[in-house]
Each structure stands twice: as C-alpha cells, then as structure tokens.
Image: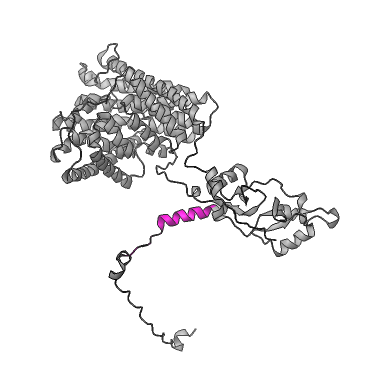
Amino acid sequence: MNSPIKPANHAGAALENYGDFTATWRVVPMTAAGAVIGALAAVIAYLLLRLIGFCTNLFYFQRFSTDFVSPAKSPMGLAMVIVPVIGALIIGFMARYGSERIRGHGIPEALEAILTRGSRVEPRVAFLKPLSAAISIGSGGPFGAEGPIIMTGGAFGSMLAQLFRLTAAERKTLLVAGAAAGMSATFSAPIASVLLAVELLLFEFKPRSFVPVSIASATAMLVRTFLLGHGPLFSLPEHAVVMLGPKGLAACVVLGVCIGFLAWITTLAVYASEDLFMRLPVHWMWWPAIGGLFVGIGGLIEPRALGVGYEYIEQLLRGSMTQDMVLRLALVKAAIWAGYLGSGTSGGVLAPLLMIGSALGGLLGPHLPAEGAGMWPLLAMGAMLSATMGSPLTGIVFAVELTGESKALLPLLVTSTVAYTFTVLVMKRSILTEKVARRGFHITREYEIDPLDVLFARDVMQTKVVGLPVRATPAQIAELLQTKLGEKSRLYAVVDGERMVGVVTRRMLSEFTARSEKDGGTIADIATRKPVTAFADETMRDVVQRMADSGKTRLPVVDRNDPTLLLGMVTLAHTLKAKQRHIEEEQRRERLLTVRSLLPAPFRPARPRPRERSAPESAPESANAG
C-alpha cells in the first residue's frame, strides 16, 4: 500500500530550528582562552625579537646585547661569509636530532598540523622553532620573524588546547588564535592578522572561530603596546592622496601586472631551489649549510640584504634610496632568500616579500605618475603580499596597518586585485600552499555556501513510498514482493493505518518470508520500532550528517511535530540533486532579457512572423532502399 502523504506547514519549524549562524555559548570560554593565548603570543613575539637581536649581536659583533641591529653594520669584513654557514649547521643539527618540523617558513607547517594532525603540535616544536628561527635570522638569514612567530604562537595555542577536552575544530581555533596573535604582536597589524587567519588558516568563516581569533589578535596588540610600543611598524610622511585620477589608476593596473609577474617568478624560484637541493647526494641536514654559504656570498655583495631588514624596508617606502641601491638590494635579497629558503632552513616569507615588492615599486616609481615619495613602493608592497600569498584582503589591510596610510586604500585595492588576478590565473597554488601540496595534501582557497545548506529534505524526497501493513503475514509479504514492491527499494515503512510504526529492510523481508506458515507472526515482530528519520524541514546537509553518524543511507521523512506522520523517503542519491542544481548554476548559460523587452511597449518593434514551411518533398524510394 502507498503511505498517506499529507501536506505540512514547515515554515514555523524551519524558522525555529535554523538561523544565520551555528554558534553556541561554547564560543564564550573559547574566546576567554583566545585572550589568554593572545597575551602569551605577544610575550613570545617580544622574546623572539629580543632573541634575534641577541643572536645578531653575538654572530656579527661578538657582544651580548638584545638590541635590534642590522648585520650590514658588522666590522667583520670577509669573515661575514662564514657566519650564515655556522648558523645553518646549528639549525641542521637541531632539525635532525630535535624535530624536523622546525624546517620551513612556519605557515605551511601550521597548515599541515591543521589538515592532518587534528591541530596537534608537538611541545618541543614550540621551543625549537623560535630558537632555530632566531639563529637563522641572527646569523644573516634573509627572513622575517613572522613565519616562526605564527608557528610558535600556533604551537602554544595547540598545547593549551591539548590540556583540555576539546574537539579538533576547537583545537584548530586556538592554534590559529595563537598564530594570528603572534603576527599581530610582531607587525602591529591586528586586523590583517585576523584576515590572514580567515583567508588561509581557518578554512571557514564562522563566529565560533572568528570571535576567539579576533580577541586573541586584539589582546596581543594590547600587550604589544606595553612591550614594543604603539603605532605602525614603518613611519612614513603623510600623503595627500585620497583618490587617484584616471592616469594614476591606470598606473596601478600596470604596477599590479608587474607585481603579479614578479610574484610568479619568485614562487618558481623558491621551489626550483628546493628541487635543486633535493637532488643533492647529501643528507638534508647539510642543505642549510650549503644555502648559508650562498647567503654569505650574497652578503658580501649587498650586506643590507642580510637579516630582517626592517629599517631598509622603511627607507624604500620613504623613497630615500638611489635606483642603483634599490636594484642591487632587490636582486641580492630575492636570490639569497629563494636559495636559502629552498634549503629547508627556518625563517619567514612576509618580510622578504615586503622588501622585494617595495623595491620593485621604487624601481618603477620614477616612470609612473608622481603621487608622493614612497607611494608606489607602498602599493607594490601590499600587492606583492596579496599576489604571492593569494590573500588579497590581508595584503591590502596589512600595507595600511604597517604604514598608517589609510588614504592609500583605493590604489591598494586596484593594484593588489590586479596582481592577485594575475597569479590566480598563472599559478595553481600560492607560495604557502605549494609546500603543503608537495607533501601530498590538497586544499582549496575558495569558500562558498554548501549547496546542501539551501536544499531541504522536502525538496528532494520521494513522496511515493510503499507502506507495509503492520499485521501482514509472511505469505502476504511474499506476494507483495512478487507484485508491488519491485527490486529498487531497500527500505520500507511499516504502517498502522495512517501512522508509521517502524521500518524494515528488504533483507529482513526476505528472511521473514522464509518462515513457514506454522511459525506465524506478523511484520510487526521484525520491524525496527525507532528508526533513524529525517524531518521534512531539515536541510540536506543535516540529513547527510545524520546518515554519516548512523551509517544509514535511506531515511524516512516525517513531520517534526508528528514523527509518526510519514511524508516520504530520502536516500543518499537524493543529495545529487543539490549537486546537479549547483553544477547547472555554474555552467548553464542563458539569456533572460532581450533589448526588445527593455523598451516601452509602444516602441517595441513588431516580432517577425514565422515563415510558413512547405511540406517536405517525399524522398525517392531509392534513397530509402536497404
């Protein structure tokens, strides 16, 4: 028999059970934990910067001091060549006998922890990563502190999360909170740090993660003001630019294309270097030493390319370098950074990208419209981050927070978007996700609404379902199997009048019909009385989740207010309808309006009358022969 399908009012239930967000009160303790991690990450960032200063002074000036100083001012002369090699040997031993996870620039390692290890980071990584980064940068490595800080802050966030009973998603939130807080404290860029977390690390945009990460970043920024001071990292003269004219915006497009090309070449260079080192017939422990020798030679050519180089980035942004100095600094910095990073040492990518990008802006600036000293290096710096990392919002806001130049937002938007578009079209992955892909994992950077979230069970369910009488005997069921039930269905509802009392599977029916008449009994004896069901007003995402939790791929659909009222049946195959609709929206092209339909009725041209077709001539018999 066919079950009674009655219309039901689902609007009230849907309004009651579904909202814009899925956040619960669990977000409150997670936010408190984020604040604690933010304060801790700020202290870690401060200690790491001091440790870098200590290593720099020890390696290049043979003195005990934590002041931040450039290796370019060292009096060592030719002996500077050997300093990066010594630092690299120490890092190689630390990686081999301590933890191999300290290799790399931090963000890919954080991504790998999130994707493959349930956001669990080994405690020793939290201590070895900043130490190895300080040695690497302090011995002349052309890196920034942000990558190691992101990894270290994330490691401490993960460690704190592992002390409590949390889900993998909650551990991810606290790991990313530590990473964002470390970046915020290092660069005095709290908003860009949150954007980086959203665009790259979280793989979601939900209140449950956005709120704790934002509070962690804000807390780190607050603590930073007491440790390192307040204000942008780079102090620039204020520009009068509010909105560029047509020539200026056209120049932004040209600069964006140039930056996109540079980001592409830079990424290729980094991984070409890595491929070259992988072909060497020596253990990877010795690779950093080889890269360190390359750095030392580069340091002789241009000492300002060694180390973090914040003061030289500021000079580039101020436009206070000559063209020859800018060109030499950019070429040497890019070469030794790509070569040394490919060797597997420890260091970050953001600061080198800032310098390389602003250097290209400085080189092209004299050939572009005059918009004030340092404007083009500023735009190029933000665009370089946007294009190379594949994070346009982060690059735009990061450039503003680093310099305080909020008036440059419009040209930054144009330049960064063009550069980002270029790299998206020519590169499959960014410099950060390429390493993850090379380790055998794939991530997507495009976030969109799940089509299963906008399709309800009532939209796809099968309404013509078979209901078996609760008092049916084996003989009656055997007859139904041969006549009405067919072969396709695998789940049947057991009904008592108009009410569903349970379900049976086809296998259960086969075993039931094998009983002899003397065994007696009815189908009620074998029915599953409390089956897993779906509600008509549930989204297909919830239905699929219940299928995954229960292991059932066919669910009866019932009314939420009356679970005995059978409305239909939904199967795993019905989820394909949502996917098919999504594919159609993505691929089907159609014209919905015509020029004629937009004109007022009196002015619409008359539609041409269709031509009368003459009857087709009969084909000769010989044409149809055979």
In the current view of this chain or complex, which residue is farthest to the right?
A: 518
Q: Nearer the viewer, residue 330 or 464?
A: 464
Q: State the image coordinates of residue 375 (x, y, percent, origin top left).
A: 19, 35
In the current view of this chain or complex, which residue is farthest to the bottom?
A: 621
**Which residue does the image show at 25% across and 43% down from the upper left?**
414
Residue 176 in view in this figure: no
Q: State the image coordinates of residue 370 (x, y, percent, origin top left).
A: 13, 38
Considering only vertical position in the picture, is 7 above or below 311? Answer: below
Q: Is residue 282 magenta?
A: no
**Which residue does the image show at 14% across and 33% down from the upper left?**
323
Q: Is residue 556 left or right of residue 608?
A: right
Q: How many marks?
A: 0
Residue 520: image quadrant is bottom right
Q: Is residue 503 left or right of residue 615?
A: right
Q: Which residues are magenta?
A: 575-594
Q: Quadrant of the N terminus?
A: bottom right
In the current view of this chain or complex, which residue is farthest to the top?
A: 64
Q: Is residue 527 left or right of residue 110?
A: right
Q: Nearer the viewer, residue 423 or 21?
A: 21
Residue 523 in view in this figure: yes
Considering only vertical position in the picture, is 508 above or below 83? Answer: below
Q: Is residue 583 magenta?
A: yes
Q: State the image coordinates of residue 247 (x, y, percent, origin top left).
A: 16, 45
- Name the image colouring: one colour
Q: Nearer the viewer, residue 606 or 82?
A: 606
Identify the main secondary structure in magenta.
helix
Q: Is residue 11 left or right of residue 431?
A: right
Q: State the image coordinates of residue 388 (x, y, percent, origin top left).
A: 31, 38
